[in-house]
Image (spheres, helix red, strand yellow):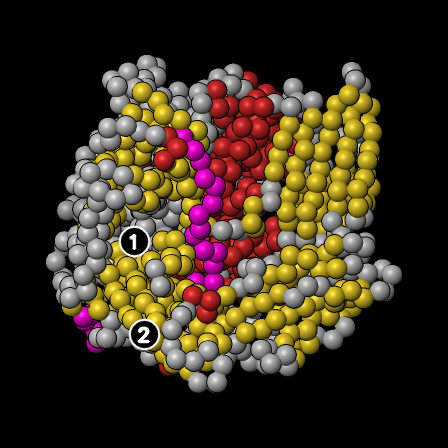
Amino acid sequence: MKAIRLKTADLTDAFGIDILKPRLSWNCSGGKVQTAFRVVARNEKKETVFDTGKRASHKMYCDYEGNELASRSKISWQVCLWDETNIPEWSAEAYFEMGLIDRTDWCAKWICGVDTNKEERLPADYYLREFSICEPVASARLYITALGVYSVRINDISIGNILAPGSTAYDKRVYYQTYDLTQYLTQENSLEICVADGWYKGKLGADQQEYVFGHQTKLLAQLEIRFKSGKKEIIGTDHSFRWCNNGPIRFTDLKDGEVYDARMRPRYVDYAIVDINEGRIPTASNSPAIAEQEVFSPVLEISPNGKNILNFGQNIAGYIRFRVKEAAGTELTISMFEAKDHGEYSDASLSFPQGNVNFVKQKITFIASGKPEMFQPEFFYSGFQYALVEGLTKINPSDFEAVAVYSDIEYGGHFSCSNEKLNKFFNNTVWSMKSNFIDVPTDCPQREKSGWTGDAQVFCNTATYIADTKAFFRKWLRDVADGQEGNGRVANVNPRCGQPGSRTDMLNGSCGWADAAIIIPYTLWKNTGDDSFIIDNYELMRNWKNYIINLCEDKTMFTLSDGHPLESLRPIYEKYKLKDSKWNKYIPEAGFHWGEWCVPESQEPVASDPITELIKPKQELTCAYTYYSMTLLEQMMRHVGKNDEADICREYAYGSKEAYHFHWVKDDKIDTKHMAELVRPIALGLLNDQEKKNVAEELALMVTHRNFKVGTGFLSTPFLLQTLAENGYLRTAYKMMENEEAPSWLAMVAQGATTVWEQYECYDNEGRPQAHSFNHYSPGAMCSFLFDTVCGIRVDGENKISIKPKPGGTLTHAKAKVLTAYGEIISGWEKEDNVIKYTFTVPANVTANLILPDGTENTLSAGSHYYRELRMS
């Protein structure tokens, strides 16, 4: 048996990290059961710094507990495994390297160019440092970050990550990256760094606010060169760096695009300014880099109005790379967009239903130099499938390509079946995940690019089936904690996209959305077995719990005094005031809450206007999520021995459940016209067996009456099909899943979608695209049903899975592959005449509890397994 997929802190060959006791993990290949392991780690001198010795254990991880790791430490490590035959086998080597851990490691200084506090968008800053090397180099490391986003060129070779240092709340945390420059250095060298506005100064969020974190971009970089002679040289940013902003990037914004004048070249006539007042010390990002991924070639289409439109065939997040040779001064513009309006360019998905005139432009303006040029944006990415090209006399499609960019995580989940439209929807979901997993889990890659908690928490479970998201979510949970207020309130968007006190600030702490602070750590713990998600996020979760407890006690919104800022809302509040109960103290009633969000209007009764729908109290939802979060948190607190905290959670879980029954459950039933209000109490565990049976029956009747169309919003859609299937309505769930009439998942596919849409109906009756995102993964959370029910794969505990497939619908075959923390699991079935044939593959050192629809139960060990089951006619 051999260890494979070796990872340090959930990263492959982690580079420049600052985790002092990183987790070392692996999977097993060959053999049946890992009976023991030994991990040995060595430093650069091949000295052993950590040796577990032979440990009798099935665990496929251990935490580094060797010699204290210092800044710049380079560690190689191997795993020796023993299987049931007791024969040892060593793995290949894995590596990790520490970054700069201590504040004193940084001798570089923050520098800038123009000294400004004005609200003005300036051309990109260019910095240059030239230096000579007179002896052989052993290693060279560049540690770098910016207030803004940066790109690096060493000796005219582009190196480093895309859109680094990534998205962050710059006033709370600044991330840095580490790059190996050893192979690039020569005798004479030039280090050129460009810094642009990015998330620091550019447009952010739904309100397109600018200057959220500052007015002036800055750079911090430290190049450390170690010579073979043993000498060391450090070149840190200071006043010796030359500076200018007269280079070709005249304007750049993460949303609006880039203006690039190829006639211009940086003329370094000034020197950088050292900012003596800037004292921020960066921390390592410890997360997957944003990287270039798939490349797409276009087809040229001529619109009815004679416009040149490039169709790349796939909606993505990324940018366009192109070759051009035009007369000097020729202006080429490329406008990226997601959906055509009867063959023409449409900016519908770049604006909002409310008619926000400050919409996103997603436009490249390129001014030719007269020489052959190859161009791609450095500090801008967009959500698009199409591009309107203007300014060229002749267009050769082979001169253009679209480059997808997203965080470089390991995608290993796959699903396929006999329904090609369902396969397409799954692939669309993967593409929406890729398009929005760009350093943080964003809602959409065009108009907002925001890390919404609600979107992330509803999709987190599905995401763990599709890819290894541990390091990605670990970083984002730090962003969530950074955005948490002193009273425990969790921001709805992290990192924040607006100034404190903005109009969206009053919606922070929205129940069901900000509960991501509990739901995501719980989901990752359960799906990966890694309880560090509990330990690392203890303060975040405890503080959110305390905030909810205080919110439960706040009933002031129903006793507004004259002159109160919200006094005009008194009639609305009075309408939704609950009757008195001793259990009301367990219901959050204050504040504003997004609620379900994006419930299909054609299927659900709606308020008289969207503002009323938003501001009305939503006690049923807040009560349900109080119970749900407190229940999950109690489990986590008991797991890590925080029993006093767990007891508090139990009290509020019990109280909110009693409150739910008092107000919303009558005669073992729930009287509602809203589909979500039937799904939610079942899925979140609020009902007893008889109540669950009755409510599930009512849900199934509602679904059937509505012709199997989706009637839930963001929060309840992930639970919808599973709720039906687990409560005796598998046939109804399959009919709903395979329904092609809008609003439904497959209706998007039928209309040509290549990603998942924010709304199920993004075109009006005349076929015109509406002001909704065409790349929004939230409705794709349905895909967890394909894995955990259609093919029946669920993680059941450490080194344990359950496989409980439920064939149904019109499907004649289905197969799912999941790359779990314990290895690759495959579950597939095929109908043939009156027999269902099953195929399962269980990874080494894992056991699977198999339950087939006919009642067959078995425990499967590592390897491939085959079963046949007679179908009932």
| Magenta residue check for 735 | no
Q: Is residue 16 rendered to the left or right of residue 773?
A: right
As drawn, the label of residue 582 is none
The reply to whether residue 777 is in sight is no
Residue 865's x, y, as percent?
Answer: 81, 39
Is 72 situated left or right of 572 in this image? right
The image shows residue 118, relative to residue 334, as above or below, that is below
Residue furthest to the top in view is 766
- Single out the mark in the foreground, 2 or 1: 2
Is residue 132 left or right of 752 when viewed as pictured? left
Task: Determine the secondary structure under disc 1.
Answer: helix
Q: Is residue 429 above or below residue 28?
A: above
Q: Quadrant of residue 194?
A: bottom left
Question: What amino acid type should be assigned to the residue bearing mark 1?
Answer: Trp
Which portion, as a residue range, is magenta? 271-298
Task: Name the residue located 35 percent from the left edge and 22 percent from the top edge.
Answer: 301
Using the image as rendered, state which of residue 677 and residue 745 is in the foreground. Answer: 745
Residue at which label 1 appears: 199
Image quadrant where residue 158 sits: bottom left
Query: Mark 2 sits on what residue?
Result: 131
Q: Evaluate whether residue 28 shows in this view.
A: yes
